[in-house]
Amino acid sequence: MKKIIAANWKLNKSPSQARTFFSSFTSAPSKEVTTVFFPSAVCLETVSVIAKEKQFQFGMQNVYFQGSGAYTGENSAAVLKELGGQFVLVGHSERRSLFGETDDLVQKKAQHIQSLGLTPMICIGETLEERENKKTYRVLESQIEIGLANLTSQVVIAYEPVWAIGTGRVATEEQVADAHQFIYEQLVKRGCQDTPILYGGSVKADNSKDLIQLPNVSGFLVGGASLEPQSFQSIIHSTISI
Ligand code: PGA
């Protein structure tokens, strides 16, 4: 399976800062890796122009489950499609914890995204409290169950343990392998065994080479380390030709 290495820029970078980033970013060989950028919505058009030239994919960090209408402040997947983007992050833990995004909303958004022929990248993951209370499997199973309900075509899962996001505390190889195995089994049960499963949470060039070799790890969703071209490129290159 082709690896997917995605950059989640969150609320960072203006259009001019995005241009500066790409002036020293060289795309990976696209036969081996699909590189995806998730800029903030205001940078989308800028990134869409550069994406054609540098041959990478891009997407939105969040959309509403309607394409247009009286929804002040929301973003449209239809606009992403017009710009040539393919992916949308859904249910990132920051959306869930800071903006009250529920499983129900995650499902509606994922369905809407698929109805436009785009690919939802559904983020799942347990909090530290849930892990310590041995609820990891239960949480993942229910997020998969709800997130994938009524989906018909292509989807990507990003496993991001909440306690590893932006904390510098990467999950151990054993924890990643174990969670990815569990997620894979859930996908097999639902006939979606070809779904890529990305890992996210403090991925850096010095841990990506080992993590990518674990079974059922199809790529990464990278936050902090995707903001500098060199560090993001090192992560991409560490996953090539293994
Ligand atoms: P991080 O963020 O790599 O900075 O931990 C990952 C994410 O939030 O997707």
Image (cartoon, rainbow, N blue to C red):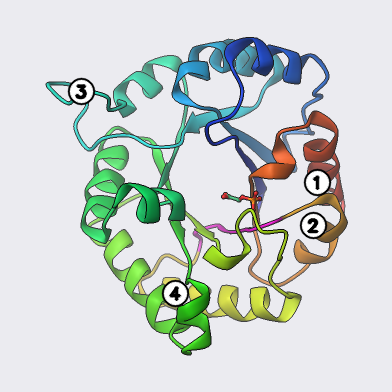
Labelled pair 2, 1 in contact (Cβ < 8 Å)? yes
**What distance separates the C-alpha of mark 2 from that of mark 4?**
26 Å
Q: Amino acid at mark 1?
A: Ile
In which quadrant will I find the C terminus? Answer: bottom right
Could you tell me the amino acid type at mark 3? Answer: Thr
Q: Single out the mark in the foreground, 1 or 4.
A: 1
- Label 1 sits on residue: 235
Q: Position of residue 120 (x, y in %)?
A: 40, 45
Quadrant of the image occupied by residue 150: bottom left
Identity, as a three-letter code, of the amino acid under mark 2:
Ser
SS label for mark 1: helix
Magenta stretch encompasses residue 12: no
Closest to the observer, 134 or 27: 134
Q: Count neighbours of disc 2 (C-alpha within 10 A) and say few if under 14, some if 14 to 19, many if 20 or more.
A: many
For badge 4, the amino acid type reads Val
Q: Earlier in the sequence, mark 3 or mark 4?
A: 3
Q: Decide which of tag 2 and tag 1 comes sooner along the chain.
A: 2
Q: Nearer the viewer, mark 3 or mark 1?
A: 3
What element does badge 3 sit on? loop
Number of other residues with Cα within 10 Å of mark 3, as a class: few under 14, some 14 to 19, many 20 or more: few
- Of tags 3 and 4, the one toward the viewer is 3
